Structures are given as C-alpha cells and as structure tokens.
Amino acid sequence: MTDVMDIERPPSVRGASVKDEIVVVSGLPRSGTSMMMSILEAGGIPPLTDSIRAADEDNPRGYYEFERVKKLREGDVAWLPEARGKAVKVITALLTFLPAAYNYRVIFMRRAMPEVLASQRQMLARRGQDSGKSGDEEIARLFGKHLRQIDAWLAAQPNVERIDVDYNALLDDPLPHLEAINRFLGGAVEVEKMVRVVDRSLRRQRA
C-alpha cells in the first residue's frame, strides 16, 4: 500500500521550473534578506509583499515583508499558491513551518556575525528599544545553535534546494554571486539588472 505521505510530498525540486516553485529568501535578522529581495525584483522575480511595513533608515529600500508569513506557525498556509513563481521573505525561525506540499528554492543569506549584531543593536537603538540583557557572545552562541538546527532541517527536505549567499562577499564583488544565483534559479533572472541595484552603502557595519 502506498504511503499517504508519499502522495502528499512533491517530487524533488531538482529539474523543476522556478515558475512552479516558491523562491524563499531567508537568513538571520540584519543579514541582507531585504537587499536580496530587491535584487531579485530587479532581476525579474516578482516579490510577494504587502508593503505594510514601510521603508525607513534601517532599510531604505523597504522590508519586502508579507505579513501572513508570520502566521505560518499558526498554520496559515492558504497564501502559498500565490507565492509560486515569486520571491517571499521568511525568517529562519519560520522555515520549518513551510508545508512539504510545495517546492522551494531557498536563498540563504549569510553575514559576518559581528556585523549582524551591530546592525541589530543600531536598529533597536533607533527605535528606543533595549537590545536585552544578553551580551554579544551569548547572542552569537544562540544564533549559531539556531543556524545549525536550520541547516540540518533544510538538508533533510527533498522538496528544498538551497544556495548560500555571503552578504559581505556579495557587496565586495557582486557579479560571480549573482551569476551563481541565476544558475540556481535556472537562468530565470537578468544578472545585469541585478548588479545595478547592489548598493555597497547599505553596509554600514563592518566586522
């Protein structure tokens, strides 16, 4: 007898068209996910966003968020068909709630941890919020543990393909990284247009 899970789970993402899949941009907070969303938009991948969260000093190009993503944990997945062929930003803490009924290509942003922490502190300070009692060393430890858990989960999903993009290296020399993203997306984006929107001035914290 065929297992029901075998029926519900889609075939491997390998070889599928990006138009039939969901492009997910993920990473730790302040790791360049909003920048990557703007880059993909320039390259021809439409973003799934509701524009509820407006651009500000921390993200001058906008946050590219879709509010219903935050309800994945609660089981709100009815919007996912709308995301096919588009890019949607999903924080790392919510990746494991993506249902197995869809194929995903995950662009995972990596950034030097000291820069992530400095950028987070600056954003909270602008909002008059305390960054908390934990010091950078403890936060870095917790982030590292979280990333290892997410790495293991992603590697175990047959309906997920993944590419890691180093934020720091991308800003230093964008072309090879954007060409790699284009190959990962099956040649679906226009690299020259993507290169034009890479803005080194967005890197305001350095390791």
Image: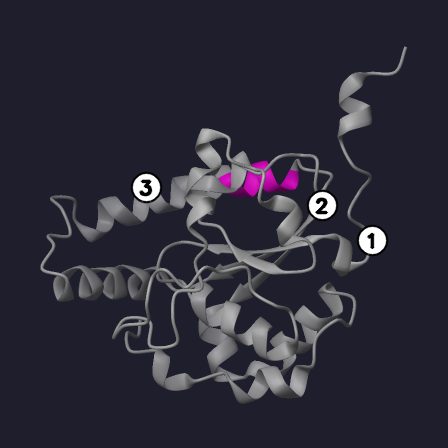
Q: Is residue 57 above or below residue 199?
A: above
Please report the residue visible at 53 percent of the width from the left and 35 percent of the height from the top.
Answer: 97
Label pair 1/2, CB-CB below 8 angstroms: yes
Q: Secondary structure at mark 1?
A: loop
Q: Which residue is mark 2?
A: 103
Q: Quadrant of the N terminus?
A: top right
> Could you say where residue 110 lies in the image, as x and y percent from the top left?
47, 61
Q: Which residue is mark 1?
A: 16
Label pair 3/1, CB-CB below 8 angstroms: no
Instruction: Please tell me whether mark 3 or mark 1 is closer to you in this view.
Output: 1
Please report the residue visible at 64 percent of the width from the left and 78 percent of the height from the top.
Answer: 43
User: Gap between marks 3 and 1, in whole Å?
Assistant: 35 Å
In the rendered image, residue 53 lying in the magenta stretch gets the answer no
In the rendered image, residue 151 lying in the magenta stretch gets the answer yes
On residue 26, which mark appears? none
> Could you say where residue 122 lies in the image, as x and y percent from the top left?
19, 66
Please report the residue visible at 40 percent of the width from the left and 54 percent of the height from the top.
Answer: 28
Q: Quadrant of the C terminus?
A: bottom left
- Circle 2: residue type: Asn
> Could you say where residue 198 lies in the image, as x and y percent from the top left?
49, 83
> Going by the image, does 64 lie left or right of 118?
right
Of marks 3 and 1, which one's residue comes earlier in the chain?
1
- Circle 1: residue type: Ala
Task: Depth check: give the residue in front, 16 or 70.
Answer: 70
